[in-house]
Image (tube, helix red, strand yellow):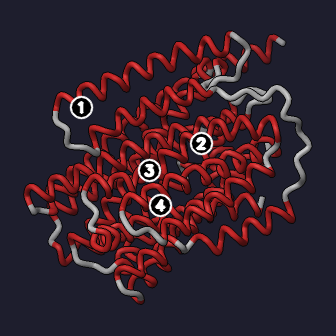
């Protein structure tokens, strides 16, 4: 469990520090809006696409060797990104890091799902989320110090190297403490066509957000995305009927608890990542704070998320889906508060408001991430826990890919055309608010489903 938590800390540290480094990367490498969007979105894109095949391979050939391969790839490409001479080299390195992190994450979640059940699984997922919360606290603060101490060109390079020592230490621990794989590769099947269709659908939806080819191209690109999704759906059914293990298992599609829980995670994760990215840009570029000051303003979110993640599993055991509903509703109020603060509160008083909102946001996040994951994975079919956990994270990462590109592009586009930070930040936060409302609707739907199912389950138990 300690190795899994260390891996979570290492890979999530990368996401936590990037936001405060974007302004320095923009200036140092003369990166345009589209390049910034790709730098932000590329990691999540490859993270998501690597999850399902890696989860499937972990189910079949064992998790230790894939864990080591993924973490090695993550480390090597992190070094490449730090040595980049242009923005597209950073994008390429981020793609490689995302693939490595996706491979590692699918093994971590597979190990937790394989070896823990019930309350213990929720507790283990809480520990994993706590590690992520600590990464969100420590990473930006250390990153802010590095950016403040070094010149602009060196600072962001040190920032991208920050996770390398942690990755090497985690590799050493994994070699020592993860038990050897004893599974066989016989019968392994990877849904290559399904993955390609999903990648095409995501990229086709992403391209209009990061390009300026006009309305005709955008409409055609979205049409291609829809067609790829329809093709993905029919292929998955065919692939499963022929005995293969598809990206989206029929048993998972049939389980409403799993699909609703996945939708909760999909909308919530993308909204929160986009929220943090645009707030970092606003604090540094709009209000003129240093990277370290911006990190300290938002640090309350990471602290409270780490704390609440540690005991969130207890609330799941007691209150179930109701706890997640309340937490998502709280996050909706927080984002509405940010929008109001930007447009109403005087600039000299806005930081105390941001600090309070960040603390409340962290509390809510700690009560959504691990608890929702535990509730959703209750419906994982036997023998396919790795795929179930991987598809859950895949949905989150594809959501993050689209939302990071869309929100950052919207923010930078409005800022470039108006020169006013107020409308730009309000528009970006508005997208996050809509996504959180969608997450809340899905959480409420699952709560009602569980409440309706409980009397039937009790009746069946009595009859038995």
Closer to the camera, 208 or 303?
208
- Residue 362's label in the rendered image is 4
Q: Are marks 4 and 2 in contact (CB under 8 Å)?
A: no
Pointer 3 or 1: first along the chain: 3
Say which residue label 3 marks: 42
On the picture, is 348 further left or further right than 146?
A: left
Neighbor class of circle 2 (other Cα within 10 Å; few <14, some 14-19, many 20+) is many
Q: Residue furthest bottom?
A: 149
Say which residue label 1 marks: 218
Distance (Cα) linking label 4 and label 2: 28 Å
Q: Quadrant of the rendered structure where residue 441 is?
A: top left
Residue 194 coordinates in the image, percent (x, y):
56, 25
Q: Quadrant of the N terminus?
A: bottom right
Q: Is residue 257 above or below residue 127?
A: above
Say which residue label 2 marks: 50
Q: Is residue 8 above or below residue 140?
A: above
Neighbor class of circle 3 (other Cα within 10 Å; few <14, some 14-19, many 20+) is many
Q: Are marks 1 and 2 in contact (CB under 8 Å)?
A: no
Residue 200 coordinates in the image, percent (x, y):
44, 30
């Amino acid at each position: 469990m300690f190795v899994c938590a260390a891996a979570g800390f290492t890979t999530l540290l990368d996401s936590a520090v990037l936001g405060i480094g974007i302004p320095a990367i923009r200036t140092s490498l003369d990166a345009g809006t589209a390049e910034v969007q790709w730098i932000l979105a590329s990691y999540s894109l490859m993270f998501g696409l690597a999850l399902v095949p890696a989860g499937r391979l972990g189910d079949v050939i064992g998790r230790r060797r894939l864990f080591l391969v993924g973490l090695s790839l993550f480390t090597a490409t992190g070094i490449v990104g730090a040595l980049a001479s242009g923005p597209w080299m950073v994008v390429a390195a981020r793609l490689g890091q995302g693939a490595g992190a996706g491979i590692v994450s699918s093994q971590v979640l597979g190990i937790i799902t394989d070896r823990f059940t019930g309350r213990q699984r929720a507790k283990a997922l809480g520990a994993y989320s706590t590690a992520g919360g600590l990464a969100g606290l420590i990473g930006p603060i250390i990153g802010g110090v590095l950016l403040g101490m070094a010149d602009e060109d060196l600072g962001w390079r040190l920032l991208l190297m920050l996770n390398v020592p942690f990755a090497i230490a985690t590799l050493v621990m994994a070699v020592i403490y993860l038990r050897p794989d004893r599974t066989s590769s016989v019968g392994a099947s990877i849904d290559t066509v399904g993955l390609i269709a999903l990648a095409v659908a995501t990229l086709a939806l992403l391209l209009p957000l990061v390009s300026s080819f006009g309305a005709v191209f955008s409409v055609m690109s979205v049409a291609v995305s829809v067609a790829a999704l329809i093709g993905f759906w029919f292929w998955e059914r065919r692939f499963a009927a022929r005995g293969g293990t598809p990206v989206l298992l029929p048993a998972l599609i049939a389980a409403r608890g799993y699909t609703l829980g996945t939708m909760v995670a999909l909308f919530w994760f993308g909204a929160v990542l986009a929220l943090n990215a645009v707030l970092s840009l606003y604090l540094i570029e709009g209000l003129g704070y240093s990277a370290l000051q911006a990190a300290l303003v938002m640090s309350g979110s990471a602290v409270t998320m780490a704390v609440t993640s540690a005991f969130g599993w207890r609330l799941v055991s007691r209150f179930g889906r109701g706890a997640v509903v309340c937490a998502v509703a709280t996050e909706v109020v927080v984002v509405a508060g940010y929008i109001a603060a930007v447009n109403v509160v005087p600039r000299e008083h806005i930081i105390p408001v941001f600090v309070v909102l960040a603390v409340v946001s962290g509390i809510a996040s700690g009560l959504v991430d691990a608890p929702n994951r535990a509730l959703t994975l209750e419906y994982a079919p036997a023998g396919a826990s790795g795929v179930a956990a991987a598809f859950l994270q895949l949905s989150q990462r594809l959501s993050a890919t689209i939302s990071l590109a869309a929100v950052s592009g919207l923010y930078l586009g409005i800022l470039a055309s108006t020169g006013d930070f107020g409308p730009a930040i309000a528009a970006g936060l508005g997208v996050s608010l809509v996504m959180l409302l969608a997450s809340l609707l899905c959480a409420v739907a699952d709560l009602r489903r569980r409440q309706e199912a409980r009397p039937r389950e009790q009746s069946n138990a009595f009859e038995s």
